[in-house]
Amino acid sequence: MEQYTLNLIFVGATFALYIGIAIWARAGSTSEFYAAGRGVHPVTNGMATAADWMSAASFISMAGLIAFTGYDNSTYLMGWTGGYVLLAMLLAPYLRKFGKFTVPEFIGDRFYSPTARVVAVVCLIVASVTYVIGQMTGVGVAFSRFLEVDNATGLYIGAAIVFMYAVLGGMKGVTYTQVAQYCVLIVAYTIPAIFISLQLTGNPIPALGLFSDHVASGQPLLERLDQVVQELGFAEYTGHHSNTFDMFLFTMSLMIGTAGLPHVIIRFFTVPKVADARWSAGWALVFIALLYLTAPAVGAMARLNLIDTVYPNGTTEAPIAYDDRPEWMQNWEVTGLLSFQDANGDGLIQWYNAGSADFAATAEERGWAGSELTVNRDILVLANPEIANLPGWVIALVAAGGLAAALSTAAGLLLAISGAISHDLIKGQLNPNISEKAELLSARIAMAGAIAVATYLGLNPPGFAAQTVALAFGLAAASIFPALMMGIFSKRVNNKGAVAGMLAGLIVTVVYIFLHKGWFFIPGTNTFTDADPLLGPVKSTSFGAIGAVINFAVAYLVSNATDEPPQEIRDLVESIRVPRGAGAAQDH
């Protein structure tokens, strides 16, 4: 059977499954649309949370970023995993005990201020829209290769699928769809990794294979990888080469951004009890670990396989002829995500670090006039089975898995956006007397509008999927996370302080990230780069941690300069933290 037909079968079958689940679990009330009726089992919610969490950035882009940079990009693993632990321990149970539908609703009630609720809506939309762009980028990458359509067409197809199951099913439909998507994505991620680990090291467990011997050379796998990348002028794969201070800030930005992401937080509103929120978090960590322990091995092995493809004779001095390139390279060239430009006209594919001063003399001696191969990092996981010559059904499975990862997170983000608009903005501010039926309709319209905006912006993302997501984490870290932490653990922070802090953190971070980089959500003006940052070593993707500090500082200064919160608010904060009646959550 042809590969294209296999791809259609696997992707089509999973899409039919998602839509079928949405029809079966159609939301009939606002409670079901926003919080799945608060009846989701902790194990089910843990699996859905894992799917919501492991986005296109985790499935498609993260291993590619690690593969091309090595140890320094392990910050993605450390930040995202550590942030989830932070969320599970410090925020999720307390927010569930408060018993609201959305994050802005909690902020509005805790800080006794409609203005705080509106500001929280703005912060949520800015962070979530930026995040969803990364998911749509992943959808476009996956579709452009496996269904042999251009990137724009792939985005439109993905948007249509999300529209059908997210708008129809709401949180109830999305929850059970995400369970199915988790099963698809984790199988799709681990099966190729097992095959490739067996090929390269003889060890069927990728995480262990990473530290095993490379079969072809007899060297430890990482030692062999270090050797070949350095022979081509690249930095040592296992070495630390970036600025340590920025690495720390970036990890912190990802951690606290994770804990402030509304689309993950609202998952903990779907369980019956506070204790179930804690169990959900534990199960989610188990399910997330299955992929995150595998990702470093996938990145390292993919980089080694890619180098061995370009230099097939075991030496980095003899590159492959362009006319002899394997079929997988030809397939990805069609998408425009892999390209070759013959700089010296010799018909061979030279791929090396042309910016390395130490390698310049070697390159000149070999007659190389520049690195001739351009590989988009987002394609590496998707191309991995083809590079390793795995069976066609594995390639089709990875296509379905990549789309599942992107669509599951996109649906969660769109739910957070629609809830903020319909429940917090329309019902909470503009029309408090709106009927439940009208509110449900407004939520669906808001989600449809968010899908349209996300698709438009996804046509011109500011960077690789994981980089775009990192920007979203920075925005959430600077605006939402401090407000949640202060709302739960401080009785002194008042409404004026919370509003001032959120605005300060958001504005400073937006200015640093977007205006400095010249990216204004306009196709054709994609100029995002982390090079030459404004504040010395602090890159745009790392600035969220500084934005959070500014948020905390402004909130405390303003709060201490103004009146204390009312006694009933201080009592409310105490009731959230003290586990009285922990068996049943407060629902109102």
Image (spheres, rainbow, N blue to C red):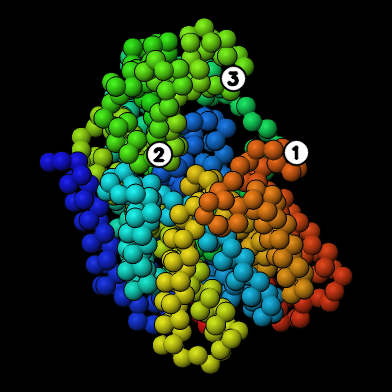
* Amino acid residing under circle 3: Ser
Q: Quadrant of the N terminus?
A: top left
Check disc 2 and report its element: helix, strand or loop: loop
Q: Do the residues bearing badges 1 and 3 touch, measured as CB atoms within 8 Å? A: no
In this rendering, which labeled residue sits more in front, label 1 or label 2?
A: 2
Frontmost residue, 80 versus 228: 228
Q: Which residue is drawn at 44% across and 66% down?
A: 452
| Residue 161 spot, x, y in % from top left | 32, 63
Mark 1 sits on what residue? 536
Q: Which of marks 1 and 2 is nearer the N terminus?
A: 2
| Residue 176 spot, x, y in % from top left | 32, 64
Q: Which residue is drawn at 36% across and 18% down?
A: 347
Q: Distance between the residues labelled 3 and 2?
A: 24 Å
Check disc 3 and report its element: helix, strand or loop: loop
Q: In this picture, is 231 found above or below 173?
A: above
Q: How far apart are marks 1 and 2 (CA)?
A: 32 Å
* Amino acid residing under circle 2: Leu
Mark 2 sits on what residue? 337
In this rendering, which labeled residue sits more in front, label 1 or label 3?
A: 3
Frontmost residue, 418 versus 47: 418
* Amino acid residing under circle 1: Gly
Q: Earlier in the sequence, mark 1 or mark 3?
A: 3
Quarter of image, res 63:
top left
Q: Do the residues bearing badges 1 and 2 touch, measured as CB atoms within 8 Å? A: no
| Residue 586 spot, x, y in % from top left | 53, 78
